[in-house]
Amino acid sequence: MGHGPGHVHAGGEALSETTRGDVPPVVVRVTPSRSRADEWGVVLAALGVPCALREEPDGWTVLVSPADAATALDALDAYDRESLPERPERATAPPPGLTLTGVYVALLLLAMFALSGSRGERSAWFARGSADAERIAAGEWWRAVTALTLHADAAHVFGNAIAAALLVSVVCRALGPGLGLWLVLLAGTAGHLAAALAQRGAHVSVGASTAIFGAIGILAALRVMTPERVRLGARRPWVVLAATLVLLVLFGVGPNVDVLGHLFGLLAGLGIGLLAGLGVGRLDTPGGRRPLTPAAQWLLVMAAAGALVGAWRLAWR
């Protein structure tokens, strides 16, 4: 190693070109930056380790005696680790991009209304697919699914179509189109089943409102469990829960409204959303499983459509 312009002592006792027994000093660091070499020299000086800085063709070197080499290396390694810029926390798995899944659900509801007509027209679709509490309790569970696609009148279907276009899209953006659809369908079905079993009398209900309130419950739970996936602007979890209750009061009660269905749909959505939040939370942690692939999500979409078609086949059987 060639000699530069001389030694620059960085604290401690002066370090000569050779140590006892004519053993030359050893290089513990090399850097092109003089300021960085000075930092290392200050660190060693603070520990009382004699060192020298020397300019070489490839940069500045930090030299210490062989007896101090291990101590110097450990100290400088620790200093380098602490002085590195903090790494950002591991980014969580980003939610899927913008999705129009809710819009497609809205179009499906409108198309189904055009096919079945309103309840006042006494269509056979309502006789076969309404959520009749007595029949559901007797074992016709598929009515809890088919009733989600039937609506009493145009105002009913248009309101639910608009809500589906907005809320179902947000759920599917957070969880993916397939998983999101399944959870909304499950929440709506569970809400109809629970309402039927709770009433057991001559109670008949129709409409996607139960699933819509299920979507609200899912979003509220996800906002609490995994807020990075559902960006609704609320900074505190209780704000989302309070807003959910306000929606239930404003739109979930009133004359000719299936209050129990809405309530059970909301509760089902909250429970399902909490479980989903735990699941996607594990996906977002280091070492967690990978999220569902787009192919798997679309397989779930087709499976959800198949479940709806299967329920109607049972209804018409």
Image (cartoon, rainbow, N blue to C red):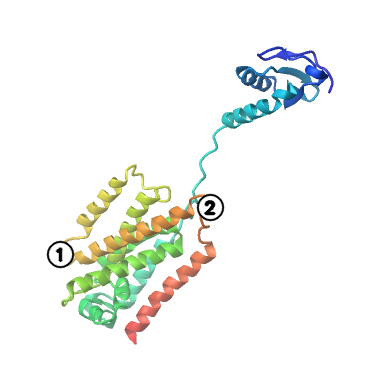
Q: Is residue 180 left or right of residue 143?
A: right
Q: Nearer the viewer, residue 281 or 133?
A: 281
Residue 134 lies, with reference to residue 89, above or below; the image says below
The residue indicated by pointer 2 is 287
Does dot 1 land on a helix, a strand or a loop?
loop
Q: Is residue 182 left or right of residue 189?
A: right
Quarter of the view holding residue 150: bottom left
- Whether residue 27 is visible to the viewer of this picture, yes or no, is yes
Number of the front mark, 2 or 1:
2
Q: Is residue 1 left or right of residue 123?
A: right
| Kind of residue indicated by mark 1 | Pro
Residue 58 lies, with reference to residue 248, above or below; the image says above
- On the rendered image, what quadrant is the C terminus found in? bottom left
Residue sitting farthest toward the right: 2
As measured in the structure, the alpha-carbon distance from the residue carrying label 2 to the one carrying label 1 is 51 Å
Q: Is residue 259 left or right of residue 140?
A: left
The residue indicated by pointer 1 is 255
In primary-sequence order, the first of circles 2 and 1 is: 1
Quarter of the view holding residue 126: bottom left
Classify mark 1: residues with Cα within 10 Å, few (<14), some (14-19) or many (20+): few
Residue in the image at 49% along x and 48% along y: 92
Does dot 2 land on a helix, a strand or a loop?
loop
Residue in the image at 42% along x and 73% along y: 305
